[in-house]
Image: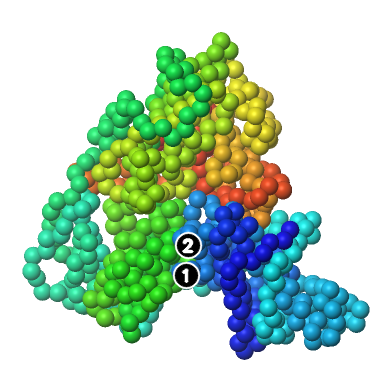
C-alpha cells in the first residue's frame, strides 16, 4: 500500500538527531485532510514518539508508538513516548480539533502513524547507502539497524540520525504486508507501565513548579449560583480569596492550607438552577408522549400505528467518578501562558486559555499530562478557566486542585434519558415495525452548539440509529429536553442507555414469541455477518442452551459501538445480598488487533464500568444540589463484586477500531435479561435494584 504525503513534512537535524514532523496523506483520513505525528531518533538510538492523544489508562502511549515502530523496524526496547502538546501538527485528520474520545485514536491513526515510521525507515536506508556508496535497494533493516548484507556492514539508527534528517522525505513510503508484522498483533511491553508502578509517572495533580501557589475552589451547589462572602481578614497562610465563575478560590502556598481555609469560610449562595431528580424523571418520561425530530426513517411510517408491544426505559444522571480529581496548573509570564492539564480536548483548551489570559493563541502552550481516568469528564474545561484566571491575577503559577466533594457536586453528568420502544409483530412474533423515541438533553447543544442543527443530536441517539436488526419499518426520533444543569459526554455516551433499552426490549419480544433469546437475535441479524459471528462465538463460550448452575440464569445482548461488534452473556443470581453477577462472557470484533492484552483489558474495564452503572450508580438531586458527594454515598462496583470475565477477540483484516467504549453498553442489558429469565419483575430502568 502506498500513499502520497500532503502539504507539509518538516525535518530538523540537531546534535545527531533525526526529527520528523509528518503531514500525512489524504488517503489516511479518508477526507483529504492533514494529520501530523512527531518522531525523534537521537544519537543513542532512542526513538521517541509524540502521542497526539491523552493517555488516561486506555493504552495509546503504547499502541500508537507500536504502529510507528512496526514500520520503522525499531527495537522496541529503544522506543519511548511523549504526550504531544496542543498544536496544528497533532490535530485529527481533516484539520479537526486535537482530542481523545469516541474510540478514535486507533481508528484514525492506524495508517498515519505507520506511514510516519515507514518514511523514517526509508530515510535511514538512504543515509546508510550514501555512506557505504551502495544502492539503497541493496540495504535492509533489522530492529534498530540498517544492514548491507553483501558487505556485512551495519549501522545503528542513532549513528545515521543526523544524516537521515538532511534527506528529502519520500513521497510514498511503502508499508509492510501485514504478514510481516512483528509488533502489531502482539502484546508488547507497555511503555508507561513501569513508571506507573514505581511512582515516577507525573499526573496533572503531581506537577510542582517553582513559586507555585495552590488553590482550593468551591462553586454554587445549584449550578449558576453566586457566592456571597462577608468581609473578613485572610485566614493564616492564605495569599488571596478571589472570585471565579459561580464561586470562590482560596489561594495559599500549600493545597491543604487552602483547603482548610476554604472550609472555615462562611459562604452563602444566591441563585442557581433548582430542580430534583424526581421531577427530572417525570419530565423526561412525559416527553415521550411528544413527537420527536426524525433521526432515522426506513420503510412505511404508517406501519407504526397500532403497536402491539410498547415499553419505556429510564436511565438516571451518572457521575464519571475518575480517581484523579479535576486539576490544572497555569503560568503566565513574559507575554506567554503555559497550562499543564490531562485533557481530552487540547485544541479547545488552548483556545479557552488564550481567551482568559488575553493572549494570542500562538502564545499559549498546553502541556498534556497523564490523567488518572477520563471517561469523557476531561473534555470539560472549568479548571482551565480557574487556573488561568488566578495565575493572571496573582502573577505566579497557580495549581487548581478540586476536592472529591467539589468533583461530585460540579460534575458534567451523563444526561438522564427516557426511551420508548413500540413494535408491531408478525404471526411468528418478529417485529415488522419499530418506533424508537428518546427524550433527553442535548450534548451537542451544550458542548458543541456549532454542530447542533434543526433540533437534531446524533450523540443522543447512538445505539438507536445503529440498530442492525432486520426490521422492515424502523423510525428513530429525538425529543429535546431542557438541561437544568450542564451535562457531559460519558464513556459510551448514549450507546449505554439506548443499547440497554433495545436489548432488554428484544429479549422481551423473544419471550413473548416463545423463542430462545439467541435464536431470536440470529433471525433478526441474518444480514449482519460480523454481529452474527460474535453472537455465535459468545453463545459457544457460555455454553448457551446447556446446563446452568441452580439458582442462576443467563442473559444475552449484542450490539455495535463505534465500529466494534460485541456480544455478551451474563450469568446472574438473585439472593439476600441482592443481584450477583457471577460470570460475563464477551466476544468482540474490532478489526485488526494491535495489542491483544490491551484490547482484553479495555473490554474487561468497560464491562466493570458498565456493570457498576447498571447495578450501583445513580445521582440524587435536591434543590439543584447533588446529594452524593463522595464514594461512600456513590458506591462503585468493588473488586469483591466483580465477576469472572472471559473475552474472545476475533482478529480480522478489517481496519481496526478502538475499544474504549464498546464493552460498556451491552452488559447491563445482559444482566437485566438474565434477571428476567430468573423470573419476577425486572425494573425497566437503571440501576437494576
Residue 180's place in the image compared with 608, above or below, is below
Q: How is the image coloured?
A: rainbow
Q: Residues within 10 Å of mark 2 (few under 14, many from 20)?
A: many
Do tag 2 and tag 1 residues touch (Cβ < 8 Å)? yes
Residue 332 image point, x, y percent? 32, 79
- Is 480 placed left or right of 236 in the picture? right
Residue at the location (32% across, 52% down)? Answer: 411
Q: Is residue 305 left or right of residue 215?
A: right
Which of the two labelled residues, at mark 2 and mark 1, occupies the earlier sequence position? 1
Horizontal arrangement in the rendering, residue 356 relative to residue 571 (left or right): left
In front of the other: 632 or 183? 183
Image vertical order of residue 451 relative to residue 354, above or below: above
Residue 634 in view (yes/no): no
At x 56% / y 39%, what residue is drawn?
A: 560
Question: Where is residue 570 drawn, in percent x and y?
Answer: 56, 34
Q: In the image as oriented, which residue stretches furthest toward the left?
A: 231
What is the secondary structure assignment of the residue under circle 2? loop
Residue at point 10%, 74% (across, down):
233
Position of 681 relative to 609 (above/below):
above
User: The C terminus appears in which quarter of the rendering?
Assistant: top left
Residue identifier under label 2: 98
Marks 2 and 1, how far apart in space? 8 Å
The image shows a total of numbered marks equal to: 2
Q: Position of residue 511 (x, y in %)?
A: 53, 18
Which secondary structure lies at badge 1?
Answer: loop
Circle 1 residue: 87
- What residue appears at the point 53 percent right and 32 percent down from the top-left corner? 467
Amino acid at each position: 500500500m502506498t500513499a502520497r504525503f500532503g502539504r507539509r513534512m518538516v525535518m530538523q537535524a540537531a546534535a545527531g538527531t533525526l526529527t520528523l514532523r509528518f503531514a500525512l496523506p489524504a488517503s489516511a483520513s479518508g477526507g483529504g485532510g492533514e494529520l501530523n505525528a512527531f518522531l525523534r531518533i537521537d544519537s543513542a538510538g532512542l526513538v521517541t514518539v509524540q502521542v497526539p492523544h491523552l493517555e488516561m489508562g486506555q493504552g495509546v502511549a503504547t499502541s500508537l508508538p507500536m504502529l510507528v515502530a512496526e514500520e520503522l523496524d525499531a527495537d522496541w526496547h529503544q522506543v519511548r513516548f511523549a504526550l504531544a502538546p496542543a498544536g496544528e501538527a497533532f490535530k485529527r485528520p481533516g484539520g479537526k480539533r486535537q482530542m481523545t474520545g469516541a474510540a478514535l485514536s486507533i481508528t484514525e491513526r492506524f495508517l498515519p502513524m505507520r506511514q510516519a515510521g515507514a518514511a523514517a525507515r526509508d530515510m535511514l536506508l538512504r543515509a546508510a547507502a550514501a555512506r557505504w556508496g551502495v544502492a539503497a535497494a541493496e540495504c535492509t533493516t533489522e530492529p534498530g539497524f540498517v544492514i548491507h548484507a553483501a558487505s556485512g556492514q551495519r549501522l545503528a539508527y542513532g549513528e545515521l540520525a543526523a544524516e537521515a534528517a538532511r534527506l528529502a522525505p519520500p513521497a510514498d513510503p511503502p508499508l509492510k504486508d501485514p504478514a510481516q508484522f512483528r509488533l502489531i498483533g502482539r502484546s508488547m511491553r507497555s511503555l508507561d507501565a513501569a513508571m506507573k508502578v514505581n511512582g515516577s509517572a507525573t499526573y496533572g495533580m503531581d506537577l510542582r513548579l517553582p513559586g507555585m501557589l495552590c488553590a482550593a475552589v468551591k462553586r454554587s451547589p445549584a449550578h449558576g449560583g453566586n457566592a456571597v462572602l462577608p468581609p473578613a481578614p485572610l485566614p493564616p497562610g492564605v495569599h488571596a480569596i478571589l472570585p471565579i465563575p459561580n464561586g470562590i478560590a482560596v489561594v495559599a502556598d500549600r493545597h491543604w492550607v487552602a483547603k482548610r481555609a476554604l472550609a472555615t469560610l462562611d459562604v452563602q449562595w444566591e441563585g442557581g438552577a433548582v430542580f430534583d431528580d424526581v421531577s427530572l424523571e417525570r419530565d423526561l418520561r412525559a416527553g415521550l408522549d411528544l413527537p420527536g425530530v426524525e433521526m432515522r426513517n426506513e420503510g412505511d411510517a404508517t406501519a407504526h400505528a397500532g403497536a402491539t408491544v410498547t415499553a419505556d426505559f429510564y436511565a438516571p444522571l451518572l457521575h464519571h467518578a475518575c480517581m484523579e480529581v479535576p486539576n490544572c496548573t497555569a503560568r503566565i509570564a513574559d507575554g506567554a501562558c503555559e497550562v499543564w492539564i490531562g485533557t481530552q480536548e487540547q485544541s479547545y483548551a488552548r483556545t479557552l486559555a488564550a481567551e482568559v489570559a488575553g493572549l494570542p493563541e500562538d502564545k499559549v502552550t498546553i502541556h498534556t499530562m497523564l490523567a488518572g481516568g477520563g471517561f469523557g469528564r476531561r473534555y470539560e474545561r472549568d479548571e482551565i478557566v480557574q487556573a488561568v484566571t488566578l495565575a493572571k491575577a496573582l502573577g505566579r503559577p497557580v495549581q487548581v486542585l478540586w476536592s472529591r466533594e467539589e468533583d461530585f457536586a460540579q460534575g458534567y453528568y451523563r444526561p438522564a434519558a427516557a426511551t420508548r420502544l413500540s413494535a408491531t409483530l408478525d404471526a411468528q412474533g418478529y417485529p415488522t415495525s419499530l418506533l424508537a423515541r428518546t427524550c433527553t438533553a442535548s450534548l451537542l447543544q451544550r458542548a458543541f452548539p456549532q454542530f447542533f442543527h434543526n433540533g437534531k443530536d446524533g450523540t443522543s441517539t447512538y445505539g438507536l440509529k445503529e440498530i442492525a436488526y432486520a426490521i422492515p419499518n424502523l423510525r428513530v426520533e429525538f425529543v429535546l429536553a431542557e438541561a437544568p444543569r450542564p451535562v457531559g459526554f460519558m464513556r459510551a455516551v448514549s450507546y449505554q442507555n439506548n443499547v440497554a433499552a433495545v436489548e432488554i426490549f428484544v429479549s422481551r419480544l423473544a419471550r413473548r414469541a416463545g423463542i430462545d433469546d439467541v435464536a431470536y437475535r440470529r433471525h433478526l441479524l441474518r444480514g449482519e455477518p460480523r454481529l452474527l459471528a460474535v453472537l455465535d462465538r459468545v453463545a459457544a463460550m457460555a455454553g448457551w442452551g446447556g446446563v446452568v448452575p441452580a439458582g442462576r440464569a443467563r442473559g444475552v445482548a449484542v450490539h455495535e459501538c463505534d465500529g466494534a461488534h460485541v456480544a455478551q452473556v451474563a450469568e446472574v443470581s438473585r439472593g439476600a445480598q441482592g443481584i450477583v453477577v457471577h460470570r460475563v462472557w464477551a466476544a468482540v470484533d474490532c478489526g485488526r488487533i494491535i495489542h491483544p492484552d490491551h484490547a482484553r483489558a479495555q473490554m474487561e474495564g468497560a464491562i466493570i464500568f458498565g456493570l457498576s452503572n447498571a447495578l450501583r450508580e445513580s445521582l440524587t438531586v435536591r434543590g439543584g444540589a447533588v446529594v452524593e458527594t463522595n464514594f461512600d454515598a456513590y458506591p462503585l462496583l468493588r473488586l469483591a463484586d466483580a465477576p469472572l470475565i472471559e473475552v474472545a477477540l476475533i482478529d480480522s483484516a478489517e481496519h481496526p477500531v478502538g475499544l474504549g467504549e464498546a464493552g460498556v453498553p451491552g452488559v447491563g442489558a445482559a444482566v437485566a435479561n438474565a434477571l428476567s429469565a430468573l423470573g419476577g419483575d425486572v425494573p425497566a430502568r437503571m440501576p437494576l435494584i
